[in-house]
Image (spheres, grey):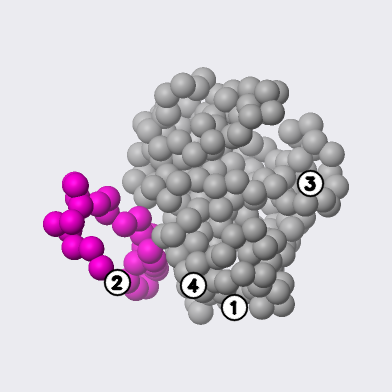
Amino acid sequence: MASFTDFLFAPPTPVSLPILGSDQRFPVHRVYCIGRNYGDHVREMGGDVKRSSPVFFMKPADALWLDGAVPYPGATTELHHEVEMVVALGSGGRDIASADALACVHAYGVGLDLTRRDLQNRAKADGAPWDSAKGFDASAPVSALTPASVCGHPLHAALALEVNGTPRQQVDIGEMIWALPEIIHELSKLWTLQPGDVIFTGTPAGVGPLLRGDRFHAALGDIARLEGHIA
C-alpha cells in the first residue's frame, strides 16, 4: 500500500457524513441520483409519466456539502432546488435482488439536488450530458444520517422543503415511481455498488429558484433535517 510520501502532493481528505448518535462517520464512495421519479415532477418538467427505464446520473462525492452556507454557483442565473430522500449504503454488490436491497441500507437522510436549470435545459436541447448542470461544487447539501437501526426502512414519510418559511415542495415518499428496493436493484445492474455509496432518490413537483440570501429547511418526516442558506 502506498504511503503519503509516495504521492506528488497530499491526497484530498476523504468525504464523510456525520451519523446521528455516533462518533463514527460514514465514508462516501459514490453519489448516485435518479431523475424523473415522482409523477408530478415529471409532468411539471413537461415529460410523459410512464414507467420505463430509470434515469440515473452521478455527482462527485465532494459535491456533498455540510456547511449551512451554500455558495451560489457561477455560470448560472437559474439555481433550482430539488429536495430528495438520501440513502446511504452499508453494503453492496452486483445484480442485487429487490427483495434483498433494503439489507444494504445503513442510514437515511435528506438533501438538495441543486441544479443549474439553465445549463440543464441547454444540455437537454443539445442532447448533451448534464454534468455541468448537476455535478458542480456544493451541489448536494445533505443532512446528518439516521441509521436504519433507529428509524427502520420508511415506506411512507413526508419529504418537504421550505424556502424563507414558505412551503415549496412536499410529497410522501410512497409516491416514488421507482421504490427504493427497485432503485438499488436497477443501479446494481449498471455498477457494482459499494459500502459508502449514497443515493439521491428523486424530487417531487415544486422545484424552483434559489437566490442569494434565501434560507431553506428540508425534512424527511422525523428522520432527518437540513437547514441552511444560499451565500
* Alpha carbon distance from label 2 to label 4: 17 Å
Which label is found at residue 23? 2
The quadrant of the rendering that contains the C terminus is top left
Type of residue at label 4?
Answer: Gly
Kindly identify which residue carries mark 3: 39
Earlier-in-chain disc, 2 versus 4:
2
Q: x, y (%) of residue 223? A: 53, 65
* Alpha carbon distance from label 1 to label 4: 9 Å
**SS under mark 4:** loop
Kindly identify which residue carries mark 1: 103
How packed mark 3 is, by other alpha carbons closer than 10 Å (few <14, some 14-19, many 20 or more), is: some
Give yes or no for contact between labels 3 and 2 (Cβ–Cβ under 8 Å): no
Kindly identify which residue carries mark 4: 90
Magenta segment, which residues? 1-27
Q: Of the residues tagged 2 and 4, which is closer to the observer?
A: 4
- Reply above or below: 213 against 104: above
Which residue does the image show at 44% across and 55% down from the upper left?
A: 143
How packed mark 4 is, by other alpha carbons closer than 10 Å (few <14, some 14-19, many 20 or more), is: some
**SS under mark 3:** helix
